[in-house]
Amino acid sequence: MAENLQEYYKRMAEAIDTQLEQKGKAALFYPVGSGSGRIVWAWINAHPDAAVIWVVPGETRRGMRLEEAKRIGQEIPPRVQLIHCEDNTPQRCLELAKIRPACIILDGSREFTAFPCGERVRWLQRFSPQAKLLGLIDTDQPVSCCLAEAMFQGAGTFSISLTEALAGALSRRLPRIPCSSGPPRRRWKNSASR
């Protein structure tokens, strides 16, 4: 099964690569714990010369990603800057822009909707216009405003439901690689409008 999962992560990384090249952005809509971090590591490892800024919304998620890297034996190379949003001041954005990131990963993108985090993400994009944008969007979190929708408008999206993830794990089958040209509309509804 481990080989099958590695092959799945590699295929997903290739699919993401295609969308990043074609559209400049891509989004993964995955439930927490279903492998989106491993897919991103497969993408990062497939691009050994690419500088990456991996932005998380807080220290909790940063700790989770550091622990995950340790658990799977993934060293975090110096070319990968794992930062949390509150560290992302205009001065820090200018410093990070000097590494000329090929990709900015927004981990837990729906959480970037809160001010000032959303504004800080925009600074990073402004100072690194060449960077492609990859969003990891938890399917089990409500959207509190439309910043995430605006950021990934027109992006190639990959989604899997919790049911599909569990069914694949239980049957030892891997989910197919779904791709669409926009976010699943039912997932973008503002929680206040329900």
Image: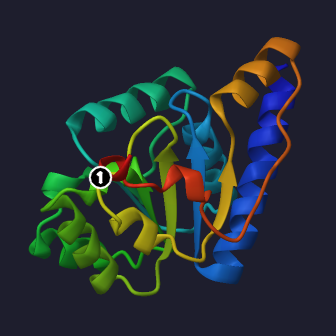
- Residue 73: % across, % down: 56, 27
Is 46 situated above or below 23? above
Q: Is residue 17 left or right of residue 114?
A: right
Image: 14 above or below 2: below
Question: Outermost residue toward the front?
Answer: 194
Q: Nearer the viewer, residue 68 or 167?
A: 167
Residue in view at x 79 percent, y 30 percent: 5
What residue is drawn where x is 82% and y is 36%? 175
Q: Is residue 78 left or right of residue 153?
A: left
In the image, what residue type sits under mark 1? Ser
Q: Position of residue 32 (x, y in %)?
A: 50, 31
**x, y percent for residue 165:** 71, 28
Colour scheme in use: rainbow
Percent position of residue 101, x then y: 43, 73
* Residue located at (30% from left, 60% from top): 145
Q: Nearest the camera: 86 or 73?
A: 86
Dot 1 crowding, Cα within 10 Å, few <14, some 14–19, many 20+: some
Q: Is residue 78 visible?
A: no
Q: Is residue 72 above or below residue 13?
A: above
Query: Which residue is found at the position 64% from the left and 73% from the top?
Result: 20
Q: Is residue 81 left or right of residue 31?
A: left
- SS of the residue under disc 1: loop
Whether residue 47 appears in this view of the structure is yes
- Quadrant where the N terminus sits is top right
Badge count: 1
Q: Which residue is mark 1?
A: 144
Q: Give above or below for 68 relative to 96.
A: above
* In the image: residue 187, left or right of residue 173: left
Depth order, front residue of 21/139: 139
